Amino acid sequence: MIVDNRLLRLFWLLAGCLSVTAGIVGILLPLLPTTPFLLLAAYCFARGSKRLHDWLVNHPRLGPPIYDWQAHGAISRRARKLAVASIIGVFAASLLLGAPTRIIIIQLVVLSAVSLFILTRPLPPDDQ
């Protein structure tokens, strides 16, 4: 039973580290979303390492979007603008590169739904 618990904690710890890495890469690459990976990392760390969870949610740069989502289900204006700009960029690139029509249609449906979700979330109290 102890081995199973340790392996499970190790799994959550590794998943959290991978998620933080993907989130940080997302800061540098505009088409990779940062916040969902940070939320996933917080979820994983909450199960694998209290110390890393506390570090992440209290981090001055990485913590605020996690807090906004957990406390208010909110997405900041800046994050919305970046997300929608990235979505438009991906769709425009697909059009310019001549993606097949079925791919364009799938992207249009999925990216429209994602945009709608993002734009209908409330703003955090300090961003209103």
Image (cartoon, helix red, strand yellow):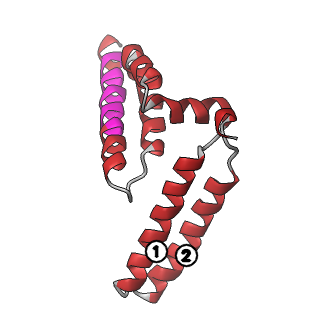
In the image, which residues are magenta? 5-20
Q: Position of residue 119 (x, y in %)?
A: 65, 56
* Residue under the point 42% across and 15% down: 50
Mark 2 or mark 1: whose residue is earlier in sequence: 1
The amino acid sitting under disc 1 is: Phe
Q: Nearer the viewer, mark 2 or mark 1?
A: 1
Of the pair 48 and 8, the residue shown nearer to us: 48
Q: Is residue 101 above or below residue 12?
A: below
Instruction: Give the quarter of the figure containing the C terminus.
Output: top right
Residue 77 visible? The answer is: yes
Q: Classify mark 1: helix, strand or loop.
A: helix
Image position, residue 72 (x, y; %)? 68, 34
Please give the label number shown on residue 3: none
Q: Label 2 sits on what residue type?
A: Leu
Q: Above or below — where is 118 with respect to 124?
A: below
Q: Quadrant of residue 37?
A: top left
Q: Is residue 93 above or below residue 48?
A: below
Callout 2: SS: helix
Residue 108 image label: 2
The residue positioned 50% from the left and 74% from the top of the image is 107
Of residues 127 and 44, the one nearer the viewer is 127
Q: Is residue 99 visible?
A: no
Residue 4 higher or lower than 17, as above or below: above
The quarter of the rendered structure image containing the N terminus is top left
State yes or no: discs 2 and 1 in contact (Cβ < 8 Å). yes
Magenta span: helix, strand or loop, mainly? helix
Q: Which residue is located at x 60 percent, y 68 percent?
A: 112
Please name the residue that numbered disc 1 is placed on: 91
Residue 127 magenta: no
